[in-house]
Image: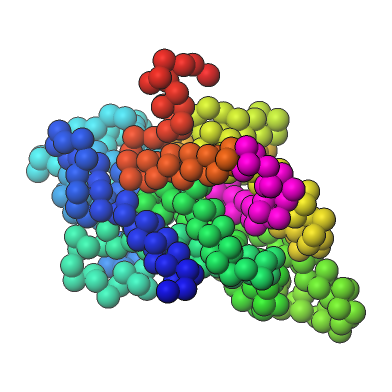
């Protein structure tokens, strides 16, 4: 039997194995069954999906209320439980946060026995009956709702199906990586193996089990670069960037390295009439930007009022956190990155313009996150906000077997050990996803051995 179908099948199975396990509701160390959202922003993303599926709108007022009253719209763990609203009101044409009117930490029980938030202002009449729009862009709800819609008659399936779609996104990251890597090697099994290692040896595996946008953003990033570098399908690359912009507007920064890759292909082939294709790749992103601004106007009263305001922080501090923090740094949650850094010089020498576009994609996006006032991404596993471009960094692994150092038995054994450790720790983070928030499985293991870093 050819090796490639085996690799694809094994990768598919491994990506979805974590979906068979869940955080215990009562006492057990692990629960086997359908997956559910766990914490952080997950229930709020799920509410947006349910609002679009059941109501056909993005107003979450009734959806949060339904969750407080026992509905599964925020997930089974949050039904009939206090859940602060991550929303804005549009009052008198202005964008006002829910926490301006209610105490997110203090809740009471209403006359019907359901949890109710405690107001912190005297007059909440406007807020109590106004539409509420999420502080998170609606892009993920737009992408998932068409698939979820057909199951709306079975409400308890919406939650695990939404999570299954994140798993599907991660598997398709593997698919597109495999296709992209074939641009850099004639060895198809090698391309498939490296693609599988990138997915299973990085936090991508974890983000295929939790309901965040990162799995989809990583899929769109890898797919866009695959469309440009391997297939020269520039319109589809622009569509993927546009979809990503509806989830994170700053995703548009990836247009720059994609246009660079396009220019590299144009000038290396001397087909200068193809310069017009720059318009083809940019047009879908422009449409996405217009859609986003129209949503801003409808939800928040102004074209310039986005769900999330970008605030500048310290680039050095952000970079240090993203690379070496023992809680979430790349080095401690994805040791594979060490091997990719070793391989990048050889990869760049071999593939020039395409390699430059890939590393610039990672560097530009990384810089945007590092300079953000909150680069950590919350109480999550790993450097969540840069997960979308992590595959662009790791793609240089394809050159490792061709490097001179690979011929040294000791060095090869060390490299294989790093790959094994990276896959093992990310397997733990995916299957026991709730146990590794703000900490690395590797650091946990080292601590249990009595060592301290």
Residue shown at 35%/72% (left/top)?
A: 147
207 over 150 or under it: above or below = above
Number of callouts in the render? 0
Image-based side of 135 in relation to 182, left or right: left
Q: Does the magenta stretch include residue 409?
A: yes
Q: Which color scheme does this rendered protein use?
A: rainbow
Residue shown at 83%/70% (left/top)?
A: 263
Instruction: Assign the magenta stretch its main secondary structure.
Output: helix
Q: Where is residue 166 in the image (x, y as percent from the top left)?
A: 40, 59
Residue nearest the observer in this picture, 31 or 416 = 416
Q: Where is residue 3 in the image (x, y as percent from the top left)?
A: 47, 68
Q: What stretch is highlighted in magenta?
A: 384-412
Q: In which quarter of the image is the N terminus?
A: bottom left
Image-based side of 271 in relation to 76, left or right: right
Image-based side of 192 in relation to 367, left or right: left
Q: Position of residue 123 (x, y in %)?
A: 33, 38
Residue shown at 24%/32% (left/top)?
A: 107
Q: Can residue 194 be seen in this view?
A: yes
Q: Where is residue 156 in the image (x, y as percent from the top left)?
A: 19, 60
Residue shown at 17%/40% (left/top)?
A: 25
Q: Is residue 383 visible?
A: no
Q: Is residue 429 magenta?
A: no
Most distant residue in the bottom direction = 273
């Amino acid at each position: 039997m050819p090796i490639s179908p085996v690799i694809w099948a094994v990768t598919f199975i491994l990506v979805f194995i974590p979906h068979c396990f869940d955080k215990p509701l009562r006492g057990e160390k692990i629960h086997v069954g359908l997956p559910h959202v766990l914490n952080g922003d997950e229930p709020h993303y799920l509410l947006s999906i349910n609002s679009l599926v059941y109501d056909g709108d993005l107003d979450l007022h009734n959806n949060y209320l339904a969750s407080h009253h026992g509905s599964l719209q925020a997930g089974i763990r949050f039904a009939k439980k206090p859940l602060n609203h991550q929303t804005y009101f549009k009052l008198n044409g202005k964008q006002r946060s829910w926490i301006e009117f209610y105490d997110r930490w203090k809740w009471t029980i209403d006359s019907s026995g359901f949890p109710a938030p405690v107001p912190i202002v005297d007059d909440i009449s406007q807020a109590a009956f106004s539409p509420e729009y999420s502080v998170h862009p609606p892009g993920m709800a737009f992408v998932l709702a068409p698939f979820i819609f057909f199951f709306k008659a079975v409400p308890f399936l919406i939650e695990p199906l939404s999570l299954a779609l994140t798993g599907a996104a991660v598997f398709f990251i593997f698919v597109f990586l495999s296709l992209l890597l074939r641009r850099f090697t004639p060895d198809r099994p090698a391309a498939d193996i490296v693609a599988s290692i990138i997915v299973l040896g990085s936090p991508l595996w974890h983000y295929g089990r939790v309901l965040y946008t990162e799995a989809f953003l990583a899929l769109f990033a890898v797919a866009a670069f695959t469309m440009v570098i391997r297939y020269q399908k520039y319109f589809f690359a622009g569509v993927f960037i546009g979809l990503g912009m509806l989830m994170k507007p700053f995703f548009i920064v990836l247009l720059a390295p994609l246009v660079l890759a396009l220019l590299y292909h144009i000038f290396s082939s001397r087909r200068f009439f193809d310069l017009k294709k720059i318009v083809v790749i940019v047009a879908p992103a422009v449409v996405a930007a217009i859609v986003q601004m129209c949503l801003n106007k409808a939800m928040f009263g102004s074209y310039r009022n986005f769900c999330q305001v970008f605030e500048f922080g310290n680039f050095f501090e952000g970079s240090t956190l993203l690379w070496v923090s023992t809680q979430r740094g790349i080095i401690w949650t994805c040791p594979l990155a060490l091997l990719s850094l070793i391989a990048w010089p050889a990869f760049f020498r071999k593939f020039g313009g395409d390699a430059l576009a890939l590393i610039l994609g990672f560097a530009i996006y990384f810089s945007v996150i590092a300079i953000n006032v909150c680069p950590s991404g919350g109480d999550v596993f790993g450097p969540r906000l840069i997960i979308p471009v992590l595959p662009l960094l790791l793609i240089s692994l394809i050159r490792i077997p061709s490097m001179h150092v690979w011929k040294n038995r000791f060095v090869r054994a060390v490299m294989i050990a790093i790959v094994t450790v990276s896959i093992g720790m990310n397997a733990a983070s995916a299957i026991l996803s709730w146990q590794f928030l703000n900490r690395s499985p590797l650091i946990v293991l080292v601590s249990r051995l009595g060592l301290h870093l």
